[in-house]
Image: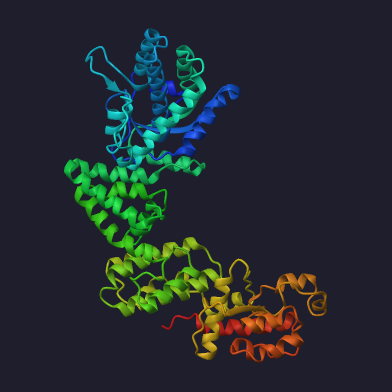
């Protein structure tokens, strides 16, 4: 891996920040985010050094600059910032002791030495103080104006959330240090705690890269090893750096758009949305290739703002793809979106984004048909046949590109774009359905959906699978008594309880009446049900494995007419 250096051994915190090194958090890295839990974990880890002698702090990823002593912090800023705040806490405690007259002369000298080592230094040439750590543009001013000067803000409640966290971290460590060292007030012991215990016994694995693309390669490698790194921050930094090349004044607008997109997405990770958005109009990119694609194709401020503007518009659509109640959908579309969420994962999302952008404005009915077709295809492909999701993603991506280019303009065009790879043929679908099982404990809603859709095909009456009055009846009960062994032995019971053919619909009261009764008693209750799937499709003299199979074969034949694309 060119231009990437894994430093030999395990550098300590002092090795990282010593020898005149300066660490710069890129202006657009995320703000300081650690809370009490992380501060407390760090403090407990430090306390544990008494017995463990050393504590491993994980990876830090640094990027070279033109200045051999200046490095960008690509990953590790939360840990480095917190250790700097802890060092400032040590200095603050020494200052308090000086005010109290405790070994004032020596402690003043210690403050100067520790400040020079851990906070900032004065080069002999310029004689101008230089901070060892520069934070992002939202946090650097507070860090230098308040924390480095140990100056309490006048209105803590009015601070930005990240500034408030930084100040609370400072107070947390000051409190911990005072509780540990205030009894003796020994400046030498406290200084040694910072110079030795913290700076020499906290060790890292340091990775230095030559450019941001190599940084992403490191992220990719470490993520594969289970080390979670902030790939979204790296993408953000690249896009903002492209804006900065043209105009510093545009950065505020870029950040506002980025934040608005995050606000819309809420709990959805932005890189996940960005990948699906990208794949709605470009050649398929996986998570580990997305950054390289952006780096290659999005160049300059205009391209970045085009990207952010389009993402801003489609973020609302993306969040609605998992919310049937969203006002973006018509009544019919809302039902279909709910069905799609039951029978698929996120593979169709890029296609739906492309269709929403390019087809829906021209023909609402065609867009609705596209969702309906995706429900059918997903039910056949995912729910019943359980085929490879990667093939789905590739086929949907090719079709989404066709929509974005204007090649596919109707629902039929879109279906034809992916049908060869994804539409499971009737023969295979019917065979897979015939032997299908569904655990109703884990998949109750999906099972009710399946049965209700078939009931609608039989009776032409819509049945709401979310209606609590509609229940799933297990003809062979989930907990059969010993009398059932006459028809199903123990092995057959395990194989049969969750077979689709063993499931039917029943009204709540009638379900309770059935309980664990034998089939001879149940069938009289079934005959009174309003559901044709139960009333007409359980007319057997007895219930045994071969009869269950026959019923499920009939259900499979019915299912291929329920979930069928009509082209």
| Residue at screen point 70% across, 73% down | 497
| Residue at screen point 32% across, 25% down | 148
| Residue at screen point 51% across, 18% down | 183
| Residue 159 x %, y % | 31, 40
| Residue 147 x %, y % | 33, 28
Whether residue 540 is visible: yes
Of 409 and 339, the residue lying toward us: 339
| Residue 3 x %, y % | 37, 32
Whether residue 399 is visible: no
Rendering quarter of residue 520: bottom right
Residue 380 located left or right of residue 233: right
Of 8 and 499, the residue lying toward us: 499
Residue 47 located left or right of residue 486: left
Of 9 and 179, the residue lying toward us: 179
Seen in the picture, residue 295 relative to 445 is either above or below; the reply is above
The colour scheme applied to this rendered structure is rainbow
């Amino acid at each position: 891996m060119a231009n990437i250096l894994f430093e030999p051994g395990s550098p300590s915190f002092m090795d990282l920040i010593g020898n005149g090194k300066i660490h710069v958090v890129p202006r657009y890295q995320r703000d300081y985010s650690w809370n009490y839990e992380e501060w407390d974990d760090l403090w407990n880890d430090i306390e544990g050094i008494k017995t463990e002698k050393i504590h491993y702090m994980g990876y830090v990823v640094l990027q070279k600059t033109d200045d051999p002593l200046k490095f960008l912090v690509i990953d590790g800023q939360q840990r480095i910032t917190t250790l700097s705040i802890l060092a400032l806490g040590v200095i603050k405690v020494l200052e308090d002791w000086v005010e109290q007259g405790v070994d004032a002369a020596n402690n003043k000298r210690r403050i100067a030495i520790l400040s020079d080592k851990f906070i900032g230094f004065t080069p002999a040439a310029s004689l101008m103080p230089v901070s060892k750590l520069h934070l992002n543009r939202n946090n650097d001013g507070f860090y230098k104006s308040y924390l480095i000067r140990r100056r309490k803000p006048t209105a803590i409640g009015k601070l930005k959330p990240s500034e408030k966290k930084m100040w609370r971290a400072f107070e947390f460590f000051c409190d911990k240090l005072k509780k540990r060292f205030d009894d003796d007030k020994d400046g030498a012991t406290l200084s040694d705690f910072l110079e030795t215990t913290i700076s020499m016994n906290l060790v890292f694995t340091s990775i230095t890269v030559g450019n941001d693309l190599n940084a992403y390669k490191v992220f990719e490698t470490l993520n594969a090893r289970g080390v979670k790194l902030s790939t979204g921050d790296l993408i953000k930094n690249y896009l903002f750096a492209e804006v900065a090349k043209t105009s510093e004044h545009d950065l505020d607008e870029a950040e506002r758009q980025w934040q608005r997109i995050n606000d819309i997405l809420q709990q959805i990770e932005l890189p996940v949305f960005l990948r699906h958005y990208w794949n709605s109009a470009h050649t398929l990119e996986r998570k580990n290739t997305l950054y390289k694609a952006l780096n290659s194709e999005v160049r300059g401020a205009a391209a970045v703002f085009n990207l952010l503007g389009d993402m801003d518009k489609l973020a609302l659509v993306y969040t609605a793809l998992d919310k049937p109640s969203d006002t973006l959908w018509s009544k019919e579309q809302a039902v279909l979106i709910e069905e799609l969420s039951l029978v698929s994962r996120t593979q169709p999302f890029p296609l739906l984004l492309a269709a929403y952008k390019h087809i829906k404005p021209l023909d609402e009915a065609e867009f609705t048909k596209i969702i309906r077709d995706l429900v059918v295809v997903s039910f056949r492909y995912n729910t019943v046949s359980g085929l490879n999701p990667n093939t789905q993603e590739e086929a949907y991506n090719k079709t989404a590109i066709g929509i974005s280019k204007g090649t596919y303009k109707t629902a039929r065009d879109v279906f034809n774009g992916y049908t060869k790879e994804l539409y499971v043929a009737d023969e295979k679908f019917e065979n897979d359905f015939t032997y299908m099982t569904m655990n109703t404990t884990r998949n109750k809603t999906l099972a009710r959906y399946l049965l209700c859709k078939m009931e609608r095909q039989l009776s032409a009456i819509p049945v709401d699978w979310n209606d609590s009055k509609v229940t799933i009846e297990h003809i062979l009960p989930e907990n059969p008594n010993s009398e059932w062994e006459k028809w199903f032995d123990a092995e057959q019971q395990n194989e049969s309880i969750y077979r689709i053919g063993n499931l039917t619909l029943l009204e709540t009261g009638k379900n309770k009446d059935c309980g664990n009764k034998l089939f001879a008693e149940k069938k009289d209750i079934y005959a009174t049900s309003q559901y044709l799937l139960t009333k007409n499709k359980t007319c057997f003299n007895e219930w045994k494995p071969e009869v269950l199979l026959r019923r499920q074969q009939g259900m499979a034949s019915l299912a291929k007419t329920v979930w069928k694309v009509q082209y």
